[in-house]
Amino acid sequence: MLFNTLATLALATVAAATPIAKRAPAPVTPRQSGGGFNFLDNFNNINNQQNVVQIQEQSLQVIDDGRQQLVIQQASEVLIVQGQKEGFKNSMNDVFRKSKFRNDFKDVTTVILVVQEIQIVIDDGRGDIFQAEIFAQSVIVANRGSDATQTVMIFSQETLIAQQILGEGREGEGFGGDIEGEQKPSKNNDVQLFGAKPTWDSVMDDPAASLGAAWEAELQDVQNLDNAGADNEANKQAAEQEKKVIGEAIAAQDAQNQDAENQAQAQADEAQKAAEEQAKAAEEQAKAGEEAAKAAEEQAQAQMAPVRN
């Protein structure tokens, strides 16, 4: 599925990049029933957006207006065709960038200036070939709505080469290839064009390159059915190891329980034996007391008996 990308040319000369005003926090997408976030629906929503690319001229160092018009036109064509062919990839790259800066700067809104180089080749039809390196700057915002705001610049590692992109043509959906009568949400993307490489006081590495490569590799791996056997075998071996560990833990627990039971039984036996010995001693003491009382009684009776002559 490809993005539907339109372009309008707005030739507005601006001296410098205008600071982006702080915006209110974006509404949170309701979670689906069961508390799970539906990634598929949100990816589809992104994929179904219609991007309107608006080209803004920023200090394009071109000698004559006619050539400048051709440069802007070709840059616009490159962005349109590349957006049609790689629209979803572009949006995923922006997701990678936004998530990276959100995680790295949790309490800060980060305005990310994304700069991409475009290599332009213009044939004026009179035998003159004009080549130029144009830099297209777009903006995305991470962690919108925080109290603190910072602005950083990143440079896309991918260079757009006009001859390659325009030479390959527009595959898939053509320009303006929406289904008749279909209404899609539109998103205006202002792209600032520079005739020289822009700069900023804070320039950082583009996280889309590494994160995109990691996602691409893992997505391809997930789709490789030949890996299922090896994965299942790894799972089996892990389960066997876990079973062994669990068995050893159960045996150790059983042994510990048996030791505790034996110790408790020994203590109970000792307590019972001590109680029996104590009872026996008490019984013997009572018997001795009875015998002593009997002897005393007999002695008393003997003393009280009359003496016979």
Image (tube, helix red, strand yellow):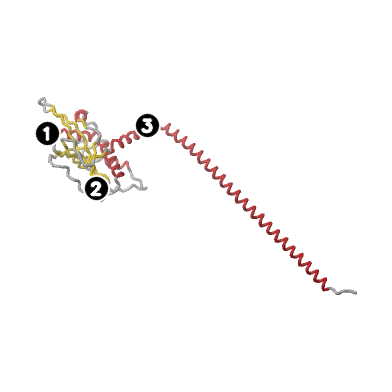
How far, Cα to Cα, is label 3 from label 2?
Answer: 43 Å
Closest to the observer, 219 or 114: 114
Question: In the image, which is nearer the foreground, mark 1 or mark 3?
Answer: 1
What's the residue type where badge 3 is placed? Asn
Q: Residue 235 appears in which quarter of the rendering?
A: top left
Say above or below: 215 vs 145: above
Return the x and y of residue 231 as percentages of the image width and height.
Answer: 42, 33
Q: Residue at x 24, y 47 (%)?
A: 149
Asked if labels 3 and 1 touch by Cβ distance under 8 angstroms, the answer is: no
Depth check, mark 3 against mark 2: the one in front is 2
What amino acid does circle 2 point to? Thr
Q: Which one is earlier in the sequence, the residue at label 1 or at label 3?
A: 1
Find residue 149 and name its label: 2
Residue at the spot of label 3: 224
At 17% from the left and 34% from the top, the residue drawn is: 134
Q: Position of residue 290 (x, y in %)?
A: 75, 65
- Is disc 2 in contact with disc 1, using a CB cutoff of under 8 Å? no
Name the quarter where the C terminus is drawn. bottom right
Neighbourhood count class around disc 3 (C-alpha, 10 Å): few under 14, some 14–19, many 20 upward:
few
Q: Quadrant of the N terminus?
A: top left
Please name the residue that numbered disc 1 is placed on. 62
Q: Residue at x 35, y 46 (%)?
A: 36
Q: Quadrant of residue 253?
A: top right
Secondary structure category for the residue under label 2: strand
Label 3 secondary element: loop
C-alpha span from label 1 to label 3: 50 Å
- Name the residue rendered at 13%, 36% in the picture: 60
| Left or right: residue 37 compared with residue 235 | left
Per the rendering, the mark at residue 176 is: none
Residue 192 percent across, percent down from the top left: 17, 39
